[in-house]
Image (spheres, rainbow, N blue to C red):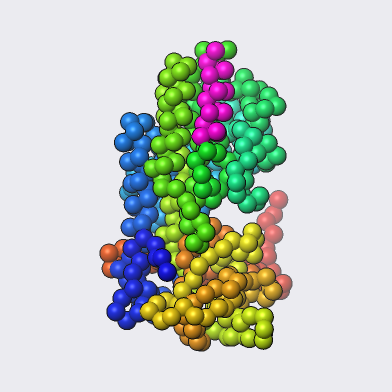
Amino acid sequence: MELYGTQTVNEKGHLVIGGVDAVDIAHVYGTPVVVYDTKLFRKRAADFRQSFEKNGMKAQVAYASKAFSSIAIYELAAEEGLSLDVVSGGELFTAVKADFPRERIHFHGNNKSYMELNYAFDENIGCIVVDNFLELSMVKEIALTRKQNMNILLRVTPGIEAHTHEFITTGQEDSKFGFDLKNGQADEAFELAHDVPYLQLLGLHCHIGSQIFEADAFNHAAETLMEKMQVWKESHSFICTVLNLGGGFGIRYTEEDEPLEPSQYVEEMGKVVFDLAKRWNYPLPEIWIEPGRSLVGDAGTTLYTAGSEKEVPGVRTYVAVDGGMSDNIRPALYDAKYTAAIANKMLSPRDTTITIAGKCCESGDKLIVDAVVASVSEGDLVAIFCTGAYTYSMAGNYNRLPRPAVIFAEDGDHQLVIRRETYEDITRLDLSLHQKVRKESK
């Protein structure tokens, strides 16, 4: 089977991630545990950055941290010269705790609260991506009241339907995100924003979806936004200095997936922007992109311990693991597909078909249906690949299961970056029915 990043198989027949034996990882940290190959993250970050540099284009590559948010991953992104895309006050707070450079933080989200926006001003972040008219009015009010400058982008929906799952498309007209380009909302937002004191409108932003395998949709989005920018140049002599084309670049979860290399996405969309700018004599804008999954998705592998087995004659064999939809809800949420291996039997024949089931009390808690792996027994180590994006960040405590540990592995070293939750952690916010809570006097 094809492995990812620095993964290899050692002489013991064990999976090795970041130079560390997966069996040793499970022994030290227990299971479930999510292991990140940080060298692969660094390589992908460099690929995106260098693709822009090679083509002589000014750019910012922002890690879309909703894919996986933690202090350590933010620190790693800062080390690699990335900017940061946050979508909530909690992600912004985490970035502050990581001391991420504030000027490289971009704040997204379709329903930012007044408190969250004030927090962004408090931290003097690099940019707020304004999503709707209510938010625009709040940002204007805060900027004028404080007499504080703030860069903004207007998020628009370009009416492009990328070929991906309906739950993760975002660029079509029927979307909860952004100002619509076709019905006049974007023009109205521009009129309200482009000459407001203390607000610096840098340009436009769009995001057309996730897990996209072709460049055509991104190219179309670039062309559509450039056309609108040219209209505003002609009507208002206004120049957008930034064009943010979002993220959504796909990765290989299974053999059927055929993603492009980062350089291909960058070169093709960059050529569209360059050609149109030259045709219209438009100053070449700085291009921003927001890879998330394509930075961390296949850098992450989750290790589980196999437990009970149930054979349904003539139908399937279930093998349960010590995690499931509590740490990876994607298969249950939108039928996400993964590949797996028995990490302590990598040299054994892959001659067994099983359904890898989770331990949550839900019939739909199946991580992989009909996985082809080596023969598996209770206590074996099951590795599920490409779990670095939208797994831990979407994890919960259903059935009061603790969230797993997360470690980084690189060049034979391993480091705990998120400790495993304990039962005490799970109950720390609970209050007893019989606990007397003192009411504050008026």
| Nearest to the observer: residue 141 or residue 401 | 401
- Between 90 and 82, the one lying in front of the other is 82
Q: Horizontal and vertical percent for residue 145?
A: 57, 27
Check residue 221 for magenta coloring.
Answer: yes
Q: Position of residue 98 (x, y in %)?
A: 40, 51
Q: Decide which of 227, 61 is in the foreground and name it.
A: 227
Evaluate whether residue 200 shows in this view: no
Residue 398 relative to residue 300: left or right = right
Q: Residue at x 66, y 31 (%)?
A: 180
Q: Which quadrant of the figure has residue 4?
A: bottom left
Q: Residue furthest left?
A: 411
> How many numbered discs?
0
**Vertical relation: 277 (above or below) 111:** above
Identified at 51% across, 56% down, the residue is 257
Q: Which residues are magenta?
A: 219-234
Quarter of the picture containing the N terminus is: bottom left
